[in-house]
Image (cartoon, rainbow, N blue to C red):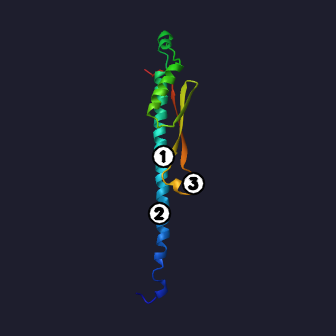
C-alpha cells in the first residue's frame, strides 16, 4: 500500500461496479431489441421487393403484349402474384399495393415483438415496421 493512499479510500471502486454492470446490461438489452427490429425490417423489405417484382413480371397482359407489343397491366394477375409472394411473410403482415404510372408499389407493415423492452415499466412491447418496394412494368432492352 502506498503512503499516499488513505485507508478510507480502500474499496470505493467496488461501490461503482453494480452501477457499471447495470449500465452494460441495459445497453446490451437495447442492442438486442434493435437487432430484432432491424432483422425483421430486412425480412420485410425483402418480401416487399419480391412481391413487387413478381407483380411487375407476372402482371403484364400477355395477350395485349402479343397483339400490339405494348405493356399493359393485368390487375388480376398482379393481385395473384402479390398474394402468392405474401405466403413467405410473417403472420400479421398487412399488405397494400397500387400502380403509380408504370410502377407497381407494394407496402407492407407489421408489429415486431421486442425482447427486453417489455420488462421495463412503461416501455413498448412491440414496434411497428413498414417497408415499401416498387418495380417497373417494362420490356427489357434488347
- The residue that appears at 48% across and 30% down in the rendered structure is 51
Locate the C terminus by quadrant.
top left
Assign a secondary structure to mark 2.
Answer: helix
Q: Position of residue 37 (x, y in %)?
A: 49, 47
Sequence-first disc among 2 and 1: 2
Residue designated by label 3: 123
Answer yes or no: is residue 85 visible: yes
Place of residue 57 in the rendered image (x, y in percent of width and height, measured from the top left): 46, 23
Residue 102: quarter of image: top right
Residue name at image x 52 percent, y 56 percent: 119
Q: Nearer the viewer, mark 3 or mark 2?
A: 3
- Check whether the beta carbons of the residues at disc 3 and disc 1 lie within 8 A of each other: no
Q: Are marks 2 and 1 in contact (CB under 8 Å)?
A: no
Q: Which residue is mark 2?
A: 24
3D distance between C-alphas at marks 3 and 2:
19 Å
Residue for point 47% across, 11% down: 66
Establish if 116 lies above or below 10.
above
Foreground of the two, 102 or 7:
7
Q: Which residue is mark 1?
A: 38
Alpha carbons under labels 3 and 1: distance apart: 18 Å
Determine the secondary structure under disc 1: helix
Extreme residue toward the bottom, this view: 3
Which of 7/72 is in front? Answer: 7
Viewer-proximal residue among 26 and 3: 26
What percent of the width, then of the height, locates residue 1? 40, 87
Dot 3 falls on a residue whose secondary structure is: loop
Disc with the residue nearer the chain's start (3 vs 1): 1
Asked if residue 6 can be seen in this view, the reply is no
Amino acid at each position: 500500500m502506498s503512503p499516499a493512499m488513505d485507508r478510507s479510500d480502500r474499496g470505493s471502486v467496488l461501490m461503482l461496479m453494480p452501477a457499471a454492470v447495470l449500465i452494460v446490461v441495459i445497453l446490451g438489452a437495447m442492442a438486442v431489441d434493435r437487432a430484432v427490429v432491424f432483422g425483421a425490417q430486412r425480412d420485410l423489405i425483402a418480401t416487399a421487393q419480391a412481391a413487387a417484382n413478381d407483380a411487375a413480371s407476372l402482371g403484364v397482359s400477355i395477350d395485349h403484349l402479343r397483339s400490339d407489343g405494348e405493356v399493359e397491366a393485368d390487375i388480376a394477375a398482379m393481385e395473384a402474384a402479390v398474394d402468392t409472394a405474401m405466403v413467405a411473410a410473417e403472420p400479421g403482415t398487412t399488405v397494400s399495393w397500387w400502380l403509380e404510372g408504370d410502377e407497381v408499389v407494394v407496402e407492407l407493415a407489421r408489429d415486431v415483438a421486442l425482447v427486453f423492452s417489455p420488462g421495463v415499466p412503461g416501455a413498448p412491447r412491440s414496434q411497428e415496421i413498414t417497408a415499401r418496394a416498387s418495380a417497373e412494368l417494362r420490356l427489357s432492352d434488347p
